[in-house]
Image: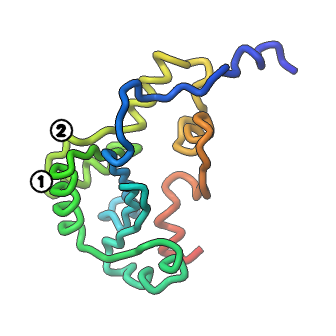
Amino acid sequence: MPSDYIQKQPLFKPKPMSMSISRNALMFLDFEGLIKEDSAIVGVWSDEKFRMVVLDPRLIGMLQSPLAHEIPISFQSINDFLEHTIRRVRKENKTIVAFSEREKHVFESQDLDVTDCYWNAHKNLKNWFKQKDSVNRPRPFTLDSILRYFSYPSYTDYGEKQATQRIVTGK
């Protein structure tokens, strides 16, 4: 066993947010779409439930797919989804959490300012690791590696910028 192995193993798994916050006060969003195209689908985790919203009419067939038997899937235009989401977030005093700036830019593309209720987990977690545990910072710094660091289950990793491509091609 390498001598630095023991040193690099944390004795406990700290939490990246020092403040206490209700999980119901968070809405996790993950927009997926082909590069240089509008978002095609969005995954939403809120109130302990996951759902998927199809935003691109070309993917409307997903509502009848086998996946629709496992998770709730609906269709909304991107404008309707964004407006409904921002109204709900503000009414229920929630914070939108995403792993990039893409989600924020999607709102901004429709002239919706979410600066007051948006938390970029990627950026904030990088800062947290820099201050609290730089030795054990996951590399590469991906959502999957961060989930493993905090002992959360991770799901199928389709590869960077591959999720929508797999849906469109059916692979």
Quadrant where the N terminus is found in the figure: top right
Q: Earlier in the sequence, mark 1 or mark 2?
A: 1
What amino acid is found at the position of numbered circle 2 in the picture? Asp
Spatial CA span between label 1 and label 2: 14 Å
Image position of 106 with respect to 167: above or below? above
In the image, 98 versus 50, the foreground residue is: 50
Q: Give residue 76's mark.
A: none
Q: Image quarter for residue 36?
A: bottom left
Instruction: Determine crowd level at label 1: few under 14, some 14-19, many 20+ residues with C-alpha closer than 10 A.
Output: few
Q: Dots 1 and 2: beta carbons under 8 Å?
A: no
Residue 47, position as x, y percentages in the image: 37, 55
Name of the residue lying farthest toward the left:
111
Q: Image quarter for residue 166?
A: bottom right
Camera-side mark, 1 or 2: 2
Residue visible at 44% across and 30% down?
125
Instruction: Determine crowd level at label 2: few under 14, some 14-19, many 20+ residues with C-alpha closer than 10 A.
Output: few
In the image, 94 versus 64, the foreground residue is: 94
In the image, 154 versus 38, the foreground residue is: 154
Residue visible at 48% across and 78% down?
68
- Residue 142 placement, left or right of 115: right
Residue 154, position as x, y percentages in the image: 60, 50
Residue 142, position as x, y percentages in the image: 53, 41
Q: Which residue is mark 2?
A: 116
Residue visible at 67% across and 20% down?
11
Q: Give residue 111's mark.
A: 1
In the image, 149 versus 49, the foreground residue is: 49
Residue 75, position as x, y percentages in the image: 31, 77
Image position of 113 with respect to 130: above or below? below
Residue visible at 60% across and 55% down?
155
